[in-house]
Image (tube, rainbow, N blue to C red):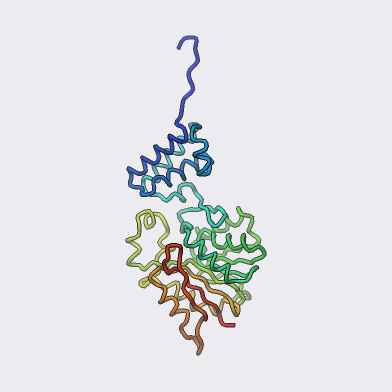
Amino acid sequence: MPGGTVPASIGPTIAESLLQTRLTLASAGDEHSGVSAEWLVGWVAGMGRAELYAHGDEQLGLAERFKLMAATAKRAAGEPLQYITGSAPFRGIEVACAPGALIPRPETELLVELALAEAPTPSRVLEVGCGTGCVACSIASEAPGSEVWATDIAPEAVDLARRNAEALGLSCAVHVVEGDLADGVPVELLGTFDLLISNPPYVPSAVVDGLPAEVIDHEPRLALDGGGDGLSVIRRIVEAAPALLAPGGVLALELFEGHAEAARELAEAHGDAAPLLEAARIERDLADRPRYLIARRAR
């Protein structure tokens, strides 16, 4: 307009962005489109869920709008939210996530809760198959003074867990090494751990390909596939536990829901004239599914 000014670009409000993102994702088949929309808009706006609704009439900037468009397209294509945003909450901490490591899940948060209730604190802890390092870091954070060792056979996971420990200021407490089971852990520490904890690969091989596309197309198969019966890694951990744990030390494992009794039988199996572990029991998750094995090395 002659003699006037060019009007500034008017962008969508946060409320409008939430609605449009939800509709886009719903049309793409996202069964939790509302949650996904809140997660993505909150991420680009730097706000929590409550803030989004308190500031719904505020506008997103141009850079935020482009970031949201790209993120929405990835989510519509089935990419997990945690890989899109690069992080996930876990028991009060925030950990970086990347495709080389399994995404932290609520079931594993309960595994940590059960383990911390059983093991003395501060403790010497070994986590097998650490992935992002969420378990190791949460234990170090919640039980100050603990010495936590974490292993993984995937170099990408080891690097990610180390970065998470450093970002959380836990590098002095969390020691991440590349290796199978306890490979890489100083030999003099074997047999001294108060807690051996793991969320191992436990899905039977025949079941893996039937997992949701969001899981099987993006998360590492190495962290999911537990072999023909789903117990191959669990079996090895249970058999190794007596040599890794201190007398009275605790084993805490997350399980495939159909493996509870088989896992307990493994723990109670006899080694050299005595059970491998004692006081083995199964705990249930928040959906009342048998999900965790808790056992102890005999004192």
- Residue at the extreme top of the image, as rendered: 3
- Residue at the extreme right of the image, as rendered: 145
Horizontal arrangement in the rendering, residue 251 relative to residue 147 (left or right):
left
Image point 48% across, 53% down: which residue? Answer: 98
Give the image quarter of residue 115: bottom right
Image point 54% across, 54% down: which residue? Answer: 95
* Viewer-side residue, 50 vs 94: 50
Q: Position of residue 172 (x, y in %)?
A: 66, 61
Location of the C terminus by quadrant is bottom right
Image point 42% across, 59% down: which residue? Answer: 220
Horizontal arrangement in the rendering, residue 207 relative to residue 125 (left or right):
left
Image point 43% across, 47% down: which residue? Answer: 35
* Viewer-side residue, 265 vs 210: 265
Picture layout, residue 8 above or below residue 85: above
Location of the N terminus by quadrant is top left
Exactly how many numbered labels are in the figure? 0
Q: Position of residue 221 (x, y in %)?
A: 40, 61
Picture layout, residue 183 above or below residue 28: below
* Viewer-side residue, 97 vs 61: 61
* Viewer-side residue, 139 vs 85: 139
Q: Position of residue 163 (x, y in %)?
A: 57, 55
Picture layout, residue 238 above or below residue 45: below
Q: Position of residue 50 (x, y in %)?
A: 52, 43
Picture layout, residue 190 above or below residue 33: below
